[in-house]
Amino acid sequence: MDSVEQFVMEPAAQGVLVKCRVTRDRRGMDRGFYPTYFLHMEKDDGKKVFLLAGRKRKKSATSNYLLSTDPTDLSRGAEAFVGKVRSNLVGTQFTVYDSGVSPKARQLARPLHSERQEIAAICYETNVMGFRGPRKMTVIVPAMTVDHTRIQLPSSSPAGTLLERWRMNMMENLLELHNKSPVWCEESQSYVLNFHGRVTQASVKNFQIVHDNDLEYIILQFGRVAEDVFTMDFRYPMCALQAFAIVLSSFDNKLACE
């Protein structure tokens, strides 16, 4: 890796499965309500490399997670700030941004800063009937160019936001992904997916993200292995920041989905 900042933004190399571990730190008074999440990449020699930390902002009208390559400084103004995840009011839809500034801030005070890009959106299907069952997720990400770079989608794009374009079925230059449907297991009396040994505990938060054209190519999978320890593995075309942001959205409380 030339730099962690560069690595977390670049798509995984084709043909490579990036294996990671997510830990949740709930120690301390406010961390009970605002845990810090840490992402480490697992290396073949058993060592771990720190990549990202994420934490929900306090006193925010909607769920708002800041992501940083510094495990100790998760402030918006820090040099290590690399992106954020913001939800709608009911916590069913999330947008992931890089570290650029909003169009309004760029016009008013920070013209030298680049405008922020939308790099992912996550939509959880509302559970109006109250049935206990697997969540349904839709993930929208920018498509890739022929030389395997992510298509740029600034926040002020005339075509609209990722979620607006998805709702209007304007999917040019976008990829629509879904969570793989689990199957009911009579023996365990639960919905299950094959995580090939990477997930050991049942949880409503466990998921695998795929494209409808190839249900066997797992782009992102996430699941619990202990109370506050989870595995997160991703492949091309996803990058670490997109994958971790999607995971943080899954941790968020969703009254309309549970």
Image (cartoon, grey):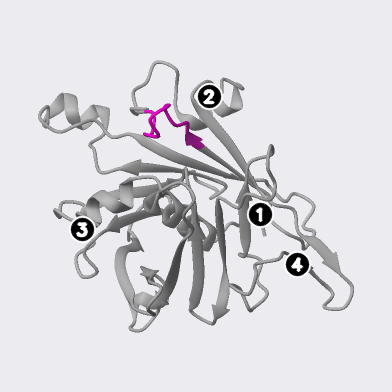
Q: Give the residue pinned by disc 2.
A: 165
Do the CB atoms of the residues marked 2 and 1 lie less than 8 Å apart?
A: no
Q: Give the residue pinned by disc 1.
A: 257
Instruction: Give the distance between the C-alpha atoms of the residues marked 3 and 2, in whole angstroms.
Output: 31 Å
Name the kind of residue labelled 4 in the image: Val
Q: Work out whether residue 218 or residue 166 is closer to the camera in this orientation and state it.
A: 218
Is residue 38 shown to the viewer in this render? no
Using the rendered view, name the quadrant where residue 188 is placed: bottom right
Do the CB atoms of the residues marked 1 and 4 lie less than 8 Å apart?
A: no
Instruction: Give the distance between the C-alpha atoms of the residues marked 3 and 1, in whole angstroms.
Output: 29 Å
Q: Earlier in the sequence, mark 4 or mark 3?
A: 3
Q: Work out whether residue 106 or residue 185 is closer to the camera in this orientation and state it.
A: 185
Relative vertical location of residue 191 with respect to residue 180 in this rendering, above or below: below
Asked whether, in this view, residue 221 is left or right of residue 61, the answer is right
User: In front of the other: label 2 or label 1?
Assistant: 2
User: In front of the other: label 1 or label 4?
Assistant: 4
Name the kind of residue labelled 2 in the image: Arg
Residue 158 percent coordinates (x, y): 39, 15
Magenta-tinted stretch? 141-151
Alpha-carbon neighbours of circle 1 within 10 Å: few (<14), some, or many (≥20)? many
Relative vertical location of residue 195 with respect to residue 239 in this rendering, above or below: below
Marking on residue 75? 3
Q: Residue at x 14, y 27 (%)?
A: 108
Q: Earlier in the sequence, mark 2 or mark 4?
A: 2
